[in-house]
Amino acid sequence: MNRLLSALKSTPGLLRGGATSAPPSDAPPPPPFPPMDLKLVHSCIASPRENHTVAHAVMHPGMETLPHFHTQHAKTLTFVRGRPLSVSVAPNATSRDPAEMVAHELRAAGDNIAVPPGTLHAFKLAENASDDNGAGVDAGCELELRFDPGAPDLERLVVIVQRLKAEDTSGETLSALVSEIAAKAKVKVDPETMHLVPLGVYVHLGDISNVGDLAKVIAGFNKKRGALVRGVAEELVARYATDGQVEKAVVPAASGA
């Protein structure tokens, strides 16, 4: 159960170490919550005339995203405070080789980097930084993630993850939902790959594209079970992330920082 919830709660781009296949039955379950927290501070659903999405993010030690890109949205990462952040970005939107990404360090409040649509990128707490901004070697950092144009489905995903973290700590609700929709669609899901359903939901709502083996795993699963993934996504939105629920979830920037 925890595997399902942990998968859906992962951060944009998916966390390093996130499951791409079921672990052995004797393996310990993954942490119930990811080391990154997101809060909406501006919503294009709540304020449609201002067509962008902004989330305040808190990254904790050990967290990094896998290389990924967003096809529909530009992303701007702005450093707020804490330990320096290393952001690696591909030289252009056609590169799909993580080895070609160039690392940039954000360390002072207001430091930022823009990532155009379709551009491969990843980020993590900086290693071997000359100093830690006084935050301490075990500290994390805070940053702002802005998406242009606005990303309503990503906003819904942030709210869904928040609600599940608060209300479904055992993963039972999400697991039951997947089983329920699979039964209605008369689709059989192997227990060893059931965790790929929430991963598919995450990719679907988050406009997230990965590269390498993870991309192949998700693409293969979506080819077989894409309808199930979309059905689960629609039900999660209906339960947890309607327009009204998203509007209520917005936290003013001063409160989110």
Image (cartoon, helix red, strand yellow):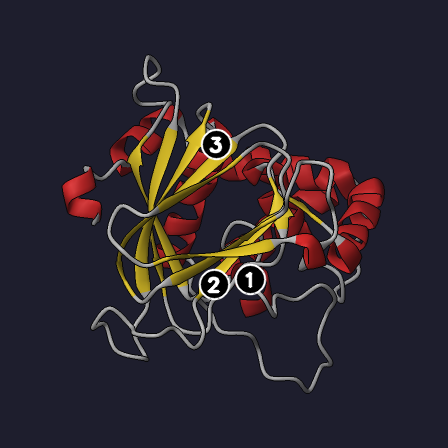
Residue 14: x and y in percent read 58, 56
Lower sequence index among marks 1 and 2: 1
Residue pictured at 59% horizontal, 28% vertical: 72
Estimate the x, y position of residue 74 in percent, counting from the top left: 51, 32
Which numbered circle lies on residue 124? 2
- Report, in whole angstroms, how far the alpha carbon at label 1 lies from the one at label 2: 10 Å
Identify the residue under disc 1: 15
Residue mark closest to the camera, 1 vs 2: 2
Q: Is residue 128 left or right of residue 16?
A: left
1 or 3: mark nearer the eye: 1
Q: Which residue is mark 3?
A: 238
Q: Residue at x 43, y 68 (%)?
A: 126
Q: Seen from this angle, which residue lies furthest top?
A: 49
Identify which amino acid the numbered label 2 is placed on. Lys
> Which one is in front, 169 or 153?
153
Secondary structure beneath dot 2 equals strand
Residue at the spot 58% in from the left edge and 46% down from the top edge: 202
Q: Earlier in the sequence, mark 1 or mark 3?
A: 1
Front disc: 2 or 3: 2
Would you place residue 32 above or below residue 52 in this image? below
| Whole-percent x, y for residue 184 in the image | 72, 39
Question: For mark 2, does the 10 Å Cα neighbourhood hold few (<14), some (14 to 19), or many (20 or more) residues?
Answer: many
Question: Residue 142: where, in percent of width, then height?
Answer: 30, 56
Residue with the most extreme left position = 254
Report the side of 123 relative to 244 (left or right).
right
- Most foreground residue, 201 or 119: 119
Check disc 1 and give the amino acid type: Leu
User: Mark 3 belongs to which amino acid?
Assistant: Ala
Mark 1 to mark 3 CA distance (whole Å): 26 Å
State the separation of the CA atoms marked 2 and 3: 33 Å
